Structure formats: C-alpha cells, structure tokens
Image (cartoon, rainbow, N blue to C red):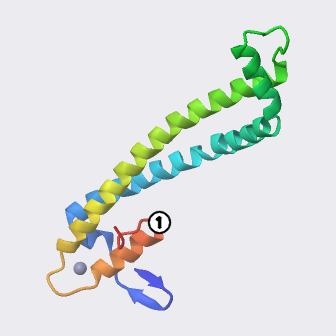
C-alpha cells in the first residue's frame, strides 16, 4: 500500500502480472547499473576540466613546446617536467573517460530500452485483477518512487 500526499492507492507487487514483475525486477537492476556508471564519470570529468584549465592557462608554454617539436629544435625549449606530467595525466584521464563513456552509453541504452518496453507492456497488461482496479496508476507511482519514469518515452 502506498500513501502519497493523501492520495491512497492499493498496490501489491504480487498482483502484477508475471511479465511485469520480471521486467520490473530487471529494470530496477539496470537502473542501478546505469546510476553507478553515471556516478563513475564524475571524477574523470572533473579532472579533465581542471587539467584542461591548466593547459589553457599556460597555453603559451604548450604552443612553444609544439613549435619546438615541429621545428625539430628540442634543445631550445625542453618541456618542463611538470607540464609533461600534466599532459600525460590528461591523456590518461581522457582515455579512461572515453572508455567509461562507452560503458555508460551501453548501460543507458539497455536501461532505456527495457524501460520503453515496460511502458508498452503496461499499456496492454499490468495486473491479474479480474475487475477494474487502479493497479496501473499505483504501479507507475511505485516505480516513480524508485526513480523509474514509466510515463514519458
Ligand atoms: Zn489490478
């Protein structure tokens, strides 16, 4: 039973049809995976921003390094150790970010695919009640509280 802002709805997971139960269980797991993948992006995104800001701030030095490389004049403008470390870290961070983004996209597609499939399923069947009931509304609200939107495609 869910009590939501004075609006009382009878809802029991066991009244849901077997298909909806199964799909709900899976979509909840996929949502968890999706959230984890999204959270894993925060650190590398933050680091990339900070490091890019550093490079932007000292872009003159980096341009002079590039010039030295193209003019094959490495002795004149040897890259400072610290600048080199920053460059290596940003390269590594962006590579990691790229891989994490790919995983995130995969998780998002799987989650969203099943979510949309579930929306289609509950349009034709939600519960095993014989009479008219408000299981569908209650179910949509229940899933909404779990962070899963079953209204908008
Ligand atoms: Zn029902």
Question: What residue is shown with label 1?
Answer: 147
For residue 93, what is the image quadrant?
A: top right
Q: Is residue 72 visible?
A: yes
For residue 7, what is the image quadrant?
A: bottom left
Residue 27 appears at what percent x and percent y? Answer: 35, 56
| Relative height, residue 61 to residue 17 (above, below) | above
Is 92 in front, or is 66?
66
Name the secondary structure under disc 1.
loop
Position of 124 with respect to 104 (left or right) is left
Residue 116 appears at what percent x and percent y? Answer: 30, 62
Position of 118 with respect to 76 (left or right) is left
For the point 64% across and 40% down, which residue is it?
44
Is 9 in front, or is 70?
70
For the point 24% across and 85% down, which residue is it?
133
- Figure quadrant of the C terminus: bottom left
Q: Tell me the quadrant of ligand 1.
A: bottom left
Is 85 in front, or is 121?
85
Residue 45 appears at what percent x and percent y? Answer: 64, 44
Count up the numbered dots.
1
- Could you classify mark 1 by the number of other residues whose Cα lies within 10 Å: few (under 14), some (14-19), or many (20 or more)? few
Q: Is residue 11 visible?
A: no
Position of 45 with respect to 127 (left or right) is right
Residue with the most extreme front position:
71
For the point 70% across and 23% down, which residue is it?
88
| Relative height, residue 87 to residue 22 (above, below) | above
Is 23 in front, or is 35?
35
For the point 41% across and 50% down, which residue is it?
108
Position of 64 with respect to 138 (left or right) is right
- Figure quadrant of the N terminus: bottom left
């Amino acid at each position: 039973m869910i009590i939501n802002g004075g609006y009382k709805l009878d809802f029991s997971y066991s009244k849901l049809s077997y298909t909806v139960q199964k799909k709900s269980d899976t979509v909840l797991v996929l949502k968890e995976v999706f959230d984890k993948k999204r959270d894993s992006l925060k650190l590398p995104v933050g680091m990339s921003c900070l490091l890019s800001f550093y490079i932007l701030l000292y872009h003159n030095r980096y341009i002079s390094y590039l010039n030295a490389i193209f003019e094959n004049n490495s002795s004149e403008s040897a890259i400072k150790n610290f600048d080199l470390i920053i460059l290596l870290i940003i390269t590594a961070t962006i590579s990691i970010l790229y891989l994490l983004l790919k995983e995130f996209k995969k998780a998002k597609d799987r989650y969203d695919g099943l979510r949309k499939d579930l929306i289609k399923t509950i349009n034709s069947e939600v519960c095993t009640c014989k009479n008219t009931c408000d299981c569908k509304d209650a179910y949509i609200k229940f899933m909404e509280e779990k962070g899963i939107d079953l209204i908008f495609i």
